Amino acid sequence: MKLSALDYLLCIHCMKPFVLLDGYATAPDSQEVITGKLHCNSCNRDYDVRGGVPRLVDESKSHQTDIETGQSFATAWKTFPRMDERYRQQFFDWISPVDPEFFRDKLVLECGCGKGRHAKIVSECGAKMIFAVDIGDAVEVAYQNTGHLPNVHIIQADIENMPFAPIFDMAFSLGVLHHMNSPVSGFLAMSKKLNDQGTICAWVYGRENNRWLIRFVNPARVAITSKLSPPLLKILAGLMALPVYLWAHLVAAPWTRMQEKMPALPSLFYQRYMTYIARFDFNEIHHIVYDHLSAPVANYVARHYFEDWFSEANLPNPVIRWHNQNSWTGISSHNPQILSDMHKRMEKLLATDAKAAALPSQSSRQ
Ligand SMILES: C[S@@+](CC[C@H](N)C(=O)[O-])C[C@H]1O[C@@H](n2cnc3c(N)ncnc32)[C@H](O)[C@@H]1O
């Protein structure tokens, strides 16, 4: 933990500042606090700093399922901790039309940071600071990957109980809210940390086009695979990842290239997503399959519900993108200029890629 984090962190119970108690230990040759105690004078509570990370989860304030989800993902991130340079392209693809320049000098909040891959990218884009929050021990992997970066703070906290005032220029959450007990509550909690010009961006699994996952994979995940031991699950995910990897690389991606030359060719099942993941090696696809099998909770969000979240958060007229025809990215801002700019960029994007259409067909919506 960097000492500068103390200017921002608040007690999750009473929203008052902390003091760092004497006796803390720093890393050799740096000001990073590795172990110590944060004390709230107002409500007289203590919170640990452990492994360089402030531990600000109070289990009595969180949903039990969210705690379990955090534990499950922590195992996943510890199993697959590797950073990959292709994450940068993936990140900007998820949050498009937000671009790298958007982050310059901004105070940024990431909700559900996993192993810290996006915090690293945002740091490299010149953000003033990024606070990256995760409910589970994934923070330990995130700290290993980003603790050395001067503008990154890794914090263990629940999205629904984050230790901040409404100060952020930008808050984002990718692949997280749909794993929460109440995705909409997570979104609203996130939106409450924005300042009065703040921008929000979320990416969630869509309900549209994912009927097969909801019908077949979901029940198996809930009843069986999420309960398997991590080593067994890793083997099973590896076995299932092999055909996915081969299909993505040997069928979907070449088919998409052929379709570009011969648009009359029919589309294959889940082709856009399969083509998309063909950019990754086997290890990454293994991790993607592992995630799908291990998460205790996965909600699939219909577009109209997703849009409602923005209205509830008083962030109307969001830019909504149908990502890979199986998930939704939504962006809105309290700053009218930024919002209008995002809509213009989205129009340009649609002009160059009609398949990134904002609306799925009627048949894929059910
Ligand atoms: C699928 S991972 C995505 C991580 C990261 N956004 C990425 O794409 O690399 C979901 C992450 O959200 C975290 N998470 C789930 N529920 C949370 C909550 N209530 N508060 C904070 N983090 C949460 C999990 O621990 C997990 O690391």
Image (cartoon, rainbow, N blue to C red):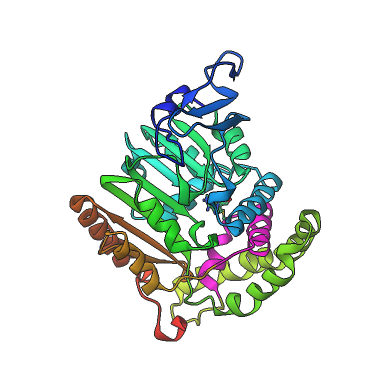
Q: Is residue 69 magenta?
A: no
- Where is residue 47? Give x, y as percent: 56, 33
Does 26 appear above or below 126?
Answer: above
Q: Is residue 242 something one can see in this rendering?
A: no
Direction from residue 281 to residue 102 in the image, left or right: left
Magenta residue span: 270-298
23 to 159, vertically: above or below: above
| Side of 251 relative to 358 (left or right) | right
Q: Position of residue 288 (x, y in %)?
A: 63, 58
Spot occupied by residue 40 in the image (x, y as percentages of width and height) = 47, 30
* Closer-to-camera residue (141/258): 141
Residue at figure coordinates x 32%, y 39% from the top left:
167
Q: Write down the quadrant of residue 278 in the picture.
A: bottom right
Query: As drawn, which residue projects farthest toward the front?
Result: 43
Q: Main secondary structure of the magenta part?
A: helix
Q: Residue at x 53, y 50 (%)?
A: 61
Q: Is residue 85 above or below residue 23?
A: below
Residue closest to the far top: 29
Q: How many marks?
A: 0
